[in-house]
Amino acid sequence: MGVSNPMRWDCAKSGCFNICKRPKIEAFAPFLPPRVSFTDIDGVCQVGAPLFNDEGCFIFIEWKEGPGPEQQPEELPAGQRRLMAALTKHLPHAIGFAVAGDAETMRVDWVQRHLRGGRGGWKRSSFDELGQMMREWWEQATAVQQ
Protein backbone atom coordinates (compact mmCIF):
# COMPACT_ATOMS: atom_id res chain seq x y z
CA MET A 1 0.00 0.00 0.00
CA GLY A 2 1.65 3.24 -1.14
CA VAL A 3 1.33 6.04 1.38
CA SER A 4 1.54 9.64 0.24
CA ASN A 5 0.41 11.21 3.54
CA PRO A 6 2.04 9.13 6.27
CA MET A 7 1.45 9.76 9.93
CA ARG A 8 4.56 11.50 11.22
CA TRP A 9 4.56 9.99 14.70
CA ASP A 10 6.81 7.29 16.11
CA CYS A 11 4.95 5.57 18.94
CA ALA A 12 8.06 3.61 19.96
CA LYS A 13 9.96 6.87 20.42
CA SER A 14 7.25 9.26 21.59
CA GLY A 15 4.57 7.09 23.18
CA CYS A 16 1.10 6.06 22.05
CA PHE A 17 -0.36 8.72 19.76
CA ASN A 18 -3.91 8.14 21.06
CA ILE A 19 -2.80 8.76 24.63
CA CYS A 20 -0.37 11.58 23.92
CA LYS A 21 -2.07 13.60 21.18
CA ARG A 22 -5.78 12.80 20.82
CA PRO A 23 -7.99 15.07 22.90
CA LYS A 24 -9.92 13.41 25.69
CA ILE A 25 -13.29 14.71 24.48
CA GLU A 26 -15.09 12.98 27.35
CA ALA A 27 -13.56 15.67 29.61
CA PHE A 28 -16.08 18.13 28.16
CA ALA A 29 -19.08 16.08 29.35
CA PRO A 30 -19.73 18.26 32.45
CA PHE A 31 -20.25 21.27 30.17
CA LEU A 32 -22.85 19.64 27.92
CA PRO A 33 -26.48 18.64 28.50
CA PRO A 34 -27.16 15.10 29.76
CA ARG A 35 -26.91 12.37 27.09
CA VAL A 36 -25.12 14.74 24.69
CA SER A 37 -21.49 14.27 23.77
CA PHE A 38 -18.96 15.03 21.10
CA THR A 39 -18.35 12.56 18.33
CA ASP A 40 -15.39 12.29 16.04
CA ILE A 41 -15.05 11.54 12.38
CA ASP A 42 -12.14 9.29 11.54
CA GLY A 43 -11.43 10.85 8.17
CA VAL A 44 -12.55 13.85 6.10
CA CYS A 45 -11.38 14.85 2.66
CA GLN A 46 -12.44 18.01 0.84
CA VAL A 47 -12.02 18.80 -2.81
CA GLY A 48 -12.69 22.23 -4.21
CA ALA A 49 -14.54 25.15 -2.79
CA PRO A 50 -14.74 26.29 0.85
CA LEU A 51 -16.93 24.43 3.34
CA PHE A 52 -20.11 26.47 2.99
CA ASN A 53 -20.03 26.77 -0.78
CA ASP A 54 -22.38 24.30 -2.47
CA GLU A 55 -19.66 23.27 -4.89
CA GLY A 56 -17.33 21.79 -2.29
CA CYS A 57 -17.07 17.98 -2.36
CA PHE A 58 -16.54 15.95 0.80
CA ILE A 59 -15.93 12.36 1.74
CA PHE A 60 -16.27 11.16 5.34
CA ILE A 61 -14.97 7.90 6.81
CA GLU A 62 -16.07 6.40 10.11
CA TRP A 63 -14.07 3.29 10.99
CA LYS A 64 -15.36 0.63 13.37
CA GLU A 65 -13.55 -2.44 14.58
CA GLY A 66 -15.52 -5.12 12.79
CA PRO A 67 -16.85 -8.45 14.04
CA GLY A 68 -15.03 -10.10 11.12
CA PRO A 69 -15.96 -10.95 7.57
CA GLU A 70 -18.60 -13.55 8.48
CA GLN A 71 -20.78 -11.44 10.79
CA GLN A 72 -22.51 -8.21 9.77
CA PRO A 73 -21.56 -5.21 11.96
CA GLU A 74 -23.95 -3.45 14.29
CA GLU A 75 -25.42 -0.11 13.30
CA LEU A 76 -23.40 3.01 13.98
CA PRO A 77 -24.32 4.69 17.26
CA ALA A 78 -27.33 7.01 16.91
CA GLY A 79 -25.28 10.21 17.18
CA GLN A 80 -22.88 9.13 14.43
CA ARG A 81 -25.80 8.08 12.21
CA ARG A 82 -27.44 11.49 12.70
CA LEU A 83 -24.16 13.30 12.01
CA MET A 84 -23.50 11.33 8.83
CA ALA A 85 -27.11 11.94 7.68
CA ALA A 86 -26.87 15.69 8.33
CA LEU A 87 -23.50 16.07 6.63
CA THR A 88 -24.52 14.17 3.50
CA LYS A 89 -27.93 15.85 3.33
CA HIS A 90 -26.76 19.45 3.70
CA LEU A 91 -23.53 19.21 1.73
CA PRO A 92 -24.78 18.37 -1.76
CA HIS A 93 -21.59 16.72 -3.00
CA ALA A 94 -20.82 14.70 0.13
CA ILE A 95 -20.62 10.97 0.73
CA GLY A 96 -19.85 9.03 3.86
CA PHE A 97 -18.56 5.53 4.37
CA ALA A 98 -18.87 3.56 7.58
CA VAL A 99 -16.17 0.89 7.43
CA ALA A 100 -15.89 -2.21 9.58
CA GLY A 101 -12.63 -4.10 9.62
CA ASP A 102 -9.21 -4.25 11.22
CA ALA A 103 -7.55 -0.83 11.43
CA GLU A 104 -4.15 -2.26 12.30
CA THR A 105 -3.92 -4.26 9.08
CA MET A 106 -6.33 -2.05 7.09
CA ARG A 107 -8.48 -5.09 6.30
CA VAL A 108 -11.93 -3.91 5.19
CA ASP A 109 -14.74 -6.42 5.75
CA TRP A 110 -17.90 -4.31 5.44
CA VAL A 111 -18.87 -0.88 4.07
CA GLN A 112 -22.04 1.12 4.54
CA ARG A 113 -22.56 4.05 2.16
CA HIS A 114 -24.19 7.28 3.40
CA LEU A 115 -25.53 9.61 0.73
CA ARG A 116 -28.08 12.46 0.55
CA GLY A 117 -29.13 12.01 4.17
CA GLY A 118 -29.79 8.28 3.88
CA ARG A 119 -27.77 5.12 4.26
CA GLY A 120 -27.64 1.72 2.67
CA GLY A 121 -27.17 -1.56 4.42
CA TRP A 122 -23.81 -3.04 5.31
CA LYS A 123 -22.22 -4.72 2.28
CA ARG A 124 -19.28 -7.11 2.26
CA SER A 125 -16.29 -5.31 0.86
CA SER A 126 -12.52 -5.14 0.72
CA PHE A 127 -9.83 -2.50 0.90
CA ASP A 128 -9.59 -2.42 -2.90
CA GLU A 129 -13.36 -2.13 -3.33
CA LEU A 130 -13.50 0.75 -0.85
CA GLY A 131 -10.60 2.34 -2.69
CA GLN A 132 -12.53 2.04 -5.95
CA MET A 133 -15.56 3.76 -4.35
CA MET A 134 -13.25 6.56 -3.21
CA ARG A 135 -11.75 6.84 -6.69
CA GLU A 136 -15.27 7.12 -8.16
CA TRP A 137 -16.04 9.89 -5.64
CA TRP A 138 -12.78 11.62 -6.64
CA GLU A 139 -13.70 11.47 -10.32
CA GLN A 140 -17.16 12.91 -9.64
CA ALA A 141 -15.71 15.58 -7.35
CA THR A 142 -13.22 16.58 -10.04
CA ALA A 143 -16.03 16.83 -12.61
CA VAL A 144 -18.08 19.07 -10.28
CA GLN A 145 -15.11 21.42 -9.88
CA GLN A 146 -14.66 21.95 -13.64
Image (tube, rainbow, N blue to C red):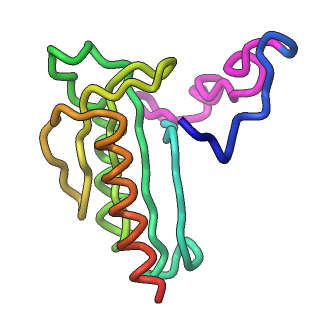
> From this viewpoint, which residue is outermost toward the bottom?
146
Tell me if 28 is positioned left or right of 126 in this view: right
Q: Position of residue 32 (x, y in %)?
A: 54, 35
Please give the name of the residue rendered at 55% of the width and 76% of the height, measured from the top-left corner: 48
State whether residue 88 is above or below residue 39. Answer: below
The residue depicted at 48 percent of the width and 36 percent of the height is: 39
- List the single residue furthest toward the front: 2
Q: Residue at x 44, y 34 (%)?
A: 36
Looking at the image, is 3 positioned above or below residue 18?
below
Does residue 48 lie above or below 40 as drawn?
below
Give x and y (percent) for residue 58: 45, 63
Residue 136 image position (x, y, % from top left): 33, 62
Question: Would residue 29 be counted in the magenta stretch?
Answer: yes
The verdict on residue 24 being magenta is: yes
Q: Is residue 52 above or below residue 41?
A: below
Q: Is residue 120 left or right of residue 111?
A: left
For this rendering, which residue is in front, 7 or 41? 7
Residue at 47% across / 84% down in the picture?
A: 145
- 97 on left or right of 106: left
Magenta residues (range): 15-38
Q: Is residue 43 left or right of residue 6?
A: left
Q: Quadrant of residue 75?
A: top left
Which residue is most to the right? 13
